[in-house]
Each structure stands twice: as structure tokens, then as C-alpha cells.
Image: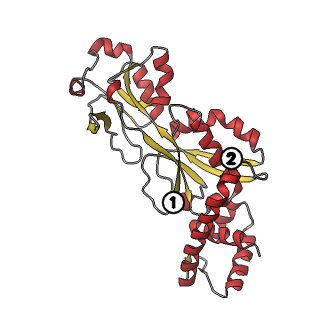
Amino acid sequence: MDKLRAMQTFVRIVEANSFSKAAETLGLPRASLTTIIQQLEDFLGKQLLQRTTRRLSLTAEGAEYHEKCLEILAAVDAAELPFREAGAGTPRGTLRVDLPGALGRNVVVPRLADFRRRYPDIKLVLSFSDRLVDITQEGVDCVLRVGQLQNSSMIGREIGSMRFLTCAAPSYLERHGMPQDLADLKSHRGIIHFSGRTGRPFEWDFLKDGANTRIQIDGDVAVNDADAYVSCALQGLGLVQAARYQVEQYIEHGQLVPVLPEYSPAPMPISLVYPKGRLATPKLGVFAGWIRTLFDGIPSLSR
């Protein structure tokens, strides 16, 4: 019995809370997972899972063993990652990744051909959303997150940094003038970017005298998509505070103009998040290395 593989399989079944879902994400027949768990339970002399037609639950011994597996697999991750990033073997299989909509469409997707050239045996399944995907329940291998991480049961590796810029179209500034200080924003209109998950508008952040100042600007147009947000700015509908990678091309061509650049917001971390023990799979290991290198090569997104 391959003990490491058995641990990975056991952890994946617990995460998915289903033999069928785990089998789908591992690319194995359900019967194979049943055999692996039976062999593991026979080897340990303990029942790890209680299985009925409707539910799956851990026994007391299974819960204790699950925690030990997470610790061991996390240690394997840490030991193997530097070597996997340098190139080890031929990774293969299906890799499911969830990406923030705008970041995925504008940064990751245009460079996928490079990943496919390097790893032709990996089948990528990409989803694009700005909601908090439940990695374990939805069978996703990893997600890209922007901002501070909250879930301590997951591992997050910082791969980049999102920098922001306040700007507006020349047509808007001709009508309303250029703000000279944060206090001037009270007389300006902004485009409201609200969360598709919570429905709440994102506040605007400014660093002033070493302190972070948050402002809720008024506006007449509200959107919940980052690309639509920038499109509204290009039409002169108001000020925006957008990711630098999205607007720098328009600033270069004079379609947008920086506003209050001396009060640039603090950057936010971009992290690759996955369950403990998952990076031990070669396909995720090489993807982690590839996407970290990708962000390192983009000045507006590098760490």
C-alpha cells in the first residue's frame, strides 16, 4: 500500500464529504477509493469513516488520523515544493482552479499557452468568480484570492501584490476639475464598485501621512464587475480606484489620468490558496510555481 497516496485519498474524501466527488476530482474510479480506504483501515486496525447511503462522517479515530495526515502532507508540501518548481517528472491529470473574474481574464488566460507548452499532460478546468468558493465542497484544487486571508484551515502562498490607482477620463476632469486633496473628493462623483457576494460597495483607501484613510465616494453608476468598472471610467462617468494592471495601458495612451497619485492606496496581497496536503500533487505544485513566476514578471502585480 502506498501510504502517502492513501493519506491524500483519505483527506480528499473528508474534504469532499463524498466518495463520488473525491473520485471525480482525483480522476479515479469510485471503487478504487473504496479499496484504498479499506486497505488503510485494515492496515491501521481502525475504522476511519462511517458510511451510510446518505451521509459520511469521521469516527473519533478518523478525526484524529485526519489531523495527523494534514500535518504530514503539509510537511511533504514544504519539502517538495522547491524541487517541483525546479522541474520534477511529468505532472499530469485534471487541475481545477478558480480565479477572480478580471484578474483571470486579463492576466492568467492570455498566458495559458505558456503553461500548456510546459505541461501538456495537465488538463485545466478554470472557473471565474468573485465569490468565496468552498474549495473542499466544490472539488476545486486551488483558488486565487486578493486580500487578507481568513480561513486558517487553508494554506495561502503569496504570489503577488495588487496595487491600486485613482484615476479618471480627461473628459470627466474637464467638466469637474482635478482634485487637489482628499477633501476635494466630496464634490466629485465616483463610479461605485460593489461586491457581487455581499452587495456592499467597496470603500476607497488612501495612504496619507503614513495612515490609511477610507472614503465612501458618491456616484450615480454602480457595477459589480471590475472590467465594467474601468469601462465606465473610460466613458467619463466618474472617478475610479482600480487595479493598476487594469488601467496602466489607458494611462499610457492618455485615455485615463491619475488622480491624487501621492495618496496611492496600500497594496493587497494576491495568494494561491489550497487545502493542507494538496500541494503534494505534482500538477498543483508546478501550477503554483508557474503562476508565481508569472506574477513576478508583471511589475504592477509582483510581490
Q: Could you tell me which quadrant the N terminus lies in?
A: bottom right
Q: Residue at x 33, y 26 (%)?
A: 262
Residue nearest the observer in this picture, 8 or 299: 299
**Of residues 10 and 223, the one drawn nearer to the viewer in this rendering:** 10
Label 2: few (<14), some (14–19) or many (≥20) C-alpha neighbours in 10 Å? some
Residue that numbered label 2 is attached to: 124
Q: Which is nearer the N-term, disc 1 or disc 2? A: 2
Near mark 1 (Cα within 10 A), the count class, few <14, some 14-19 or many ≥20, is: some
Residue 63 image-quadrant placement: bottom right
Lateral position of residue 199 relative to residue 120, left or right? left
Image position, residue 102 (x, y; %): 51, 36
Residue 97 percent coordinates (x, y): 60, 49
Q: Is residue 275 left or right of residue 219?
A: right
- Labels in figure, total: 2
The image's mark for residue 218 is none
Q: Position of residue 117 (x, y in %)?
A: 76, 38
Do callouts 1 and 2 mark residues in contact (Cβ within 8 Å)? no
Residue drawn at (53%, 31%), measured in percent from left and top? 299
Disc 1 target residue: 154
For this orientation, the residue located farthest to the top is 174
Visual colour scheme = secondary structure
Q: Disc 2 residue type?
A: Leu
Relative to 10, say whether 131 is above or below: above
Looking at the image, residue 106 lies above or below residue 35: above
Q: Is residue 47 visible?
A: yes
Residue 239, visible in the rendered structure:
no
Q: Residue at x 48, y 24 (%)?
A: 248
Secondary structure of the residue carrying tag 1 is strand
Q: Residue 221 occupies which quadrant of the picture?
A: top left
